[in-house]
Amino acid sequence: LDLADARVHERLLAMERENLHLFGYGAKGMTLSMLETAISLTGERIAAADLHHLLQLGKDILRHPVELLDGIREAVSAVAKECRVVLITKGDLFHQEAKVAASGLGELFHRIEIVSEKDERAYRRVLDEFSVDASRFLMVGNSLRSDIEPVLELGGWGLHMPYHVTWAHETSHGVDPGHPCLLRVDSPSEIPAALRALRARAGGSEAAGLPG
């Protein structure tokens, strides 16, 4: 197989999307989809040694150390002095809990929510539990699809901080870049000032959501 062939990546992406309802998000589901794609592409002729190599790749991802973006601790600390900060992330519970613990940021969050999907229903549930109206909620994240779009649909606010690596599944969205409740920042150091700017637009806000 030519791993540089775009069709191979398309098959893997299609397999991951097909399996989302079974495996959910995260490295474990990705690994199972890699194995299934390899078996399919080789007509079930792939060697056990090669399957083992793919499995090892998945384990390496699960063991990979957490690397914080420069300035993110300072940004979260600054926001936490003004707002209740909730970490909302999706994926495998065990892996996400381990990453939060390894990040050293857990103490900065008022609450940590690990959800199976970041959609309107999940955000609405969190807001209802905090008794916070969507108009007083800001979500900060790198994914327009998962972090920003559902919050804007609920009437909340979005702060988009793009990252140079984004899963293809997350690039499909319907967010208008000119939406009045949306701002963009390019680094963590810009987050506190952007929050103040959005609070000025909103006339005050009590809650901020920061995804992982």
Image (cartoon, helix red, strand yellow):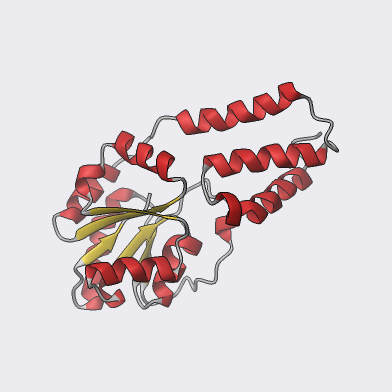
Q: Position of residue 210 (x, y in %)?
A: 32, 55
Q: Is residue 69 visible?
A: no
Question: To which quarter of the image does residue 102 belong?
Answer: top left
Instruction: Say whether residue 127 is visible.
Output: yes
Q: Nearer the viewer, residue 142 or 209?
A: 209
Task: Identify which residue is drawn at 61% across, 38% down.
Answer: 31
Which residue of the protein is positioned furthest toward the top in this rendering?
49
Q: Nearer the viewer, residue 198 or 51?
A: 51
x 37%, y 38%: residue:
99
Residue 87 screen position, x and y as percent? 31, 53
Indicate the position of residue 151 as horizontal and vertical percent values. Answer: 39, 70
Q: Quadrant of residue 79?
A: bottom left
Numbered circles on residues, count: 0
50 to the left or right of 89: right
Report the front residue among 16 and 207: 16
Please give the name of the residue rendered at 51% of the width and 32% of the height, measured from the top-left corner: 61
Residue shown at 27% from the left, 56% from the top: 86
Q: Residue furthest left?
A: 81
When the figure is inspected, residue 49 is found, relative to residue 74, above or below; the finding is above
Residue 101 x %, y %? 30, 37
- Residue in front for this viewpoint, 22 or 200: 22
The residue positioned farthest toward the front in the image shown? 22
Q: Locate the N terminus by quadrant.
A: top right
